[in-house]
Image (spheres, rainbow, N blue to C red):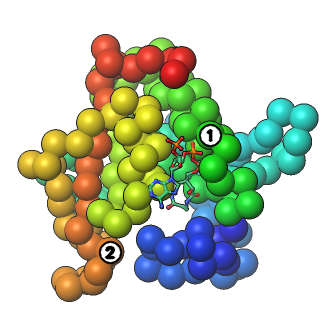
């Protein structure tokens, strides 16, 4: 998944097997530590791993921080079947109902229309005033301009 240029189109680059191994070790450690993180997504009666969806605490500085973020990344052959949105609803329910969060945010680079569509379908709202330049990317990098979407607990609907 992390080595596929389609999946990583809106990230600085693909990730090697070794970097992925380290990344997933960190993901696993976060879940053990905090009780949440990027969970693996399984299709009921189908593949046991099609990607990851979940909640995390971004570590960079931005005006909207501190915040809990929802994010998603799936194997390309499983796109377009509503899996990201379905898994995200479960993650949002966990965040609002189990963790008692008041707000969950999502962000992506401006051109990532698929990811923004998932945010729209979840009822998340973009306030243009929240747009930001991702501090981990160098000045002038085409992926640097980001949009921020927010969802408050009162606006969350567990079903479509
Ligand atoms: C973003 C991602 C998780 C979406 O997964 P998914 O399971 O296909 O998402 P869903 O099927 O729930 O919804 C996708 C929506 O985007 C729409 N879509 C697909 N391609 C699109 C495009 N080029 N422009 C606009 N919308 C698009 C789909 O039609 C669908 O909307 P619909 O239900 O109204 O038809 C998946 O594309 C992915 O893993 N991308 C690479 C990783 C990534 O960019 N992650 C986000 C980083 S912030």
Q: Nearer the viewer, residue 31 or 128?
A: 128
Residue 146 in sight here: yes
Please state the horizontal and vertical placement of residue 116, each as a whole percent of the image. Answer: 39, 50
Residue 94 is left or right of residue 154, and the answer is right
- Residue 69: quadrant of the picture: top left
At x 32% / y 18%, what residue is drawn? Answer: 155
Please state the horizontal and vertical placement of residue 12, each as a whole percent of the image. Answer: 44, 79
At x 9% / y 48%, what residue is drawn? Answer: 129
Ligand 1 closer than 8 Å to label 2 CB:
no
> Which mark, by number, is residue 122?
none
Q: Vertical placement of 83 versus 99: above or below?
A: below
Query: Could you tell which of marks 2 and 1 lies nearer the N-terminus?
Result: 1
Please state the horizontal and vertical placement of residue 45, each as a whole percent of the image. Answer: 90, 35
Q: Vertical placement of 150 versus 71: above or below?
A: above
Label 1, on which residue?
Answer: 82
Residue 45 is left or right of residue 31, and the answer is right
Badge 1 crowding class, 10 Å Cα cut-off, few under 14, some 14 to 19, many 20 or more, is few
Residue projecting furthest to the left: 129
Q: Vertical placement of 73 versus 149: above or below?
A: below
Q: Vertical placement of 101 versus 128: above or below?
A: above
At x 29% / y 43%, what residue is drawn? Answer: 149
Q: Secondary structure at mark 2?
A: loop
- Residue 138: quadrant of the picture: bottom left
Residue 19 in sight here: no
Residue projecting furthest to the right: 45
Badge 2 crowding class, 10 Å Cα cut-off, few under 14, some 14 to 19, many 20 or more, is many
Please state the horizontal and vertical placement of residue 15, each as a whole percent of the image. Answer: 60, 78
């Amino acid at each position: 998944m992390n080595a596929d240029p389609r999946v990583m189109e809106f990230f600085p680059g693909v990730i090697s097997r070794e970097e992925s191994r380290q990344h997933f070790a960190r993901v696993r450690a976060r879940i053990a530590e905090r009780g949440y993180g990027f969970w693996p997504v399984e299709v009921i009666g189908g593949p046991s791993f099609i990607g990851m969806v979940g909640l995390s605490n971004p570590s960079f500085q931005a005006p909207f921080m501190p915040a809990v973020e929802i994010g998603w990344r799936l194997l390309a052959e499983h796109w377009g079947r509503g899996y990201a949105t379905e898994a995200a609803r479960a993650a949002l329910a966990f965040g609002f109902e189990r963790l008692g969060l008041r707000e969950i945010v999502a962000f992506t680079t401006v051109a990532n229309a698929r990811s923004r569509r998932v945010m729209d379908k979840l009822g998340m709202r973009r306030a243009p005033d929240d747009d930001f330049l991702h501090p981990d990317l160098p000045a002038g990098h085409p992926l640097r301009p980001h949009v921020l979407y927010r969802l408050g607990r009162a606006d969350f609907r567990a079903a479509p």
